Image (cartoon, helix red, strand yellow):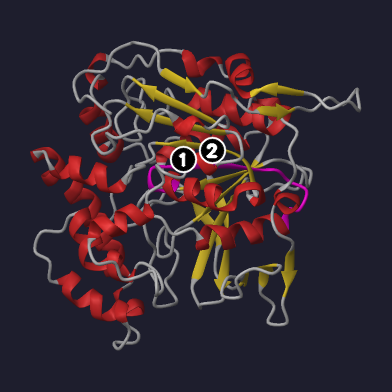
Amino acid sequence: MGVLGCSTSAPPLVHFAPKTARIPLKRPESKEKYSESLRKLVQDNCPSLFTPFEPKWWLNNGHIQTTYSVFADISQVDSVWYRRQNLKLVDGGTLGLDFAPIDDAALSDDTPIVVILHGLTGGSYEPYIKSILTHVIKPVDKGGLGYRAVIPHSRGCGGVPITSTKFYSAGGTDDFRQALIYISNRYPRAKLLGLGFSLGSNIMTRYIAQEGEKCRLSSACVLANPWDLAANSDILSGTFIGRNVYNNALGTNLMNVAKQHYKALMADPSLPIAKALKPLMSVSQMTLTNFDKVFLSQVGGPPPQFPYATVNEYYDAMSSHECIGEIRIPYLAINSADDPVVQYVPMDGAGNGYAVMVLTSGGGHLGWFNDGTGKDRWTTKPVLEWLTLMGREVLAKSGSERGHKVVLGTDEFLRNEGGDERLGCKECEGGGLINGNAGVEGLRKGL
């Protein structure tokens, strides 16, 4: 769904299931259980979600919004610093978790935590993340939410080293699952609120659906989810600008991440990932589709799931559009009708009473800029209203209470009790203070 003409000032299309889920609410003055329909909660508490997107005239197009997000020099807008905690995984890999604010001593241990997943090759430095995160972590007396936030990075992204012969894929959820084990164990009394961007939205949606009632997140909001990877890839490849601009930019970013970690990925030349890396480096015109076809569809995960016979089989397996019906937490999805990267959006939400599906008339891919400052985005207000509702008003268990019990093994790895022994994490060296305005050399932001 999407038209790449000029954005209009029409209000967003907001879709609720015919019967929305009833959500338990806090009522400190009474011991009686109290709940309200998700529809009414959103209508009463998220008024900005129903307001038109009305950008400046020169930003009134999905291509311009997307291009501005990538090329505009807005890295210094919404300045933030993080404290990085590196985690060693059972398979030898490393995850980097960036926490904010860096001085959280005054925050209680039950302060809600917004867990954020970045886009394809992004990181905590992304302006689209900081535009919301800075308000999330700002103290209440200064107009913010007063929450904590954490950004788990995909392997090799955001300056996190690759320390095993494993990359990441478009829909793999195990690394996110392991990050949540650590976060919920470190802050056992805190509610975990999910926030995803682009490919991170796809991964987050798949995790939520896979976990069902055991999901450690108590709610989620996802922006610019690519949903059906095969359908959107076909649409993207079917236009001149899609093939030669967006597909190329996405593929080049991925290629540059692979090049940055070439030595680590080639540590054992006999492994499939090393064998797949050689033909990847010989591809003359790198696109996202080519990268996925030659590399990720073959070695984006362990056997027997990998390799896939075709790239479309890989896309079908990694997509999230057929997962919506399995979601069991309040879930808000926001897409733009003029997003040149994502044009298929499952607006019916699979009839799931927990899902709220929103389509704005404009905004491009991860844009939604109201003006040229880079600071004012339409999405900021509705997302903050949603996070306020879910963090302060909704009655929900903490991440440690919602998920499987976390146990410490004799090898000092944290794991889900009774879970996959191949999944586990523990703190390791590295990390420290991270400048959220710096970025990574050789990678385009905004994707």
Q: Is mark 1 on a helix, strand or loop?
A: helix
Which residue carries the number 2 mark?
A: 133
Amino acid type, label 2: Leu
Residue at 56% across, 75% down: 422
* Residue 366: in magenta span: no
Amino acid type, label 1: Ile
* Residue 190: in magenta span: yes
> Image quadrant of residue 408?
bottom right
Q: How crowded is mark 2: few (under 14 residues within 10 Å), some or many (20 or more)?
A: many
Check residue 108 in the rendering and tell me which mark sits there, or answer none: none
Q: How crowded is mark 1: few (under 14 residues within 10 Å), some or many (20 or more)?
A: many
Task: Give how far across and how far down residue 121 sits, in percent.
Answer: 35, 54
Check residue 129 in the rendering and tell me which mark sits there, or answer none: 1
Q: Which of the pair 272/85 is nearer the observer? A: 272
Task: Give how far across and how far down residue 57 sits, in percent.
Answer: 25, 14
Q: Is mark 2 on a helix, strand or loop?
A: helix
Residue 78 appears in the rendering? no
Task: Give how far across and how far down residue 360 sits, in percent.
Answer: 37, 22
| Quarter of the image with the N terminus in it | top left
Residue 3 in the figure: left or right of residue 94? left
Residue 28 in the figure: left or right of residue 271? right
Distance CA(mark 2)–CA(mark 1): 6 Å
| Quarter of the image with the C terminus in it | top left
Residue at 44% across, 59% down: 172
Q: Do the residues labelled 2 and 1 touch (CB within 8 Å)?
A: yes
279 vs 178: above or below? below
Range drawn in magenta: 186-200
Residue at 68% across, 70% down: 414
Q: Which of the pair 144/189 is nearer the observer? A: 189
> Image quadrant of residue 43?
top right
Residue 424 in the figure: left or right of residue 401? left
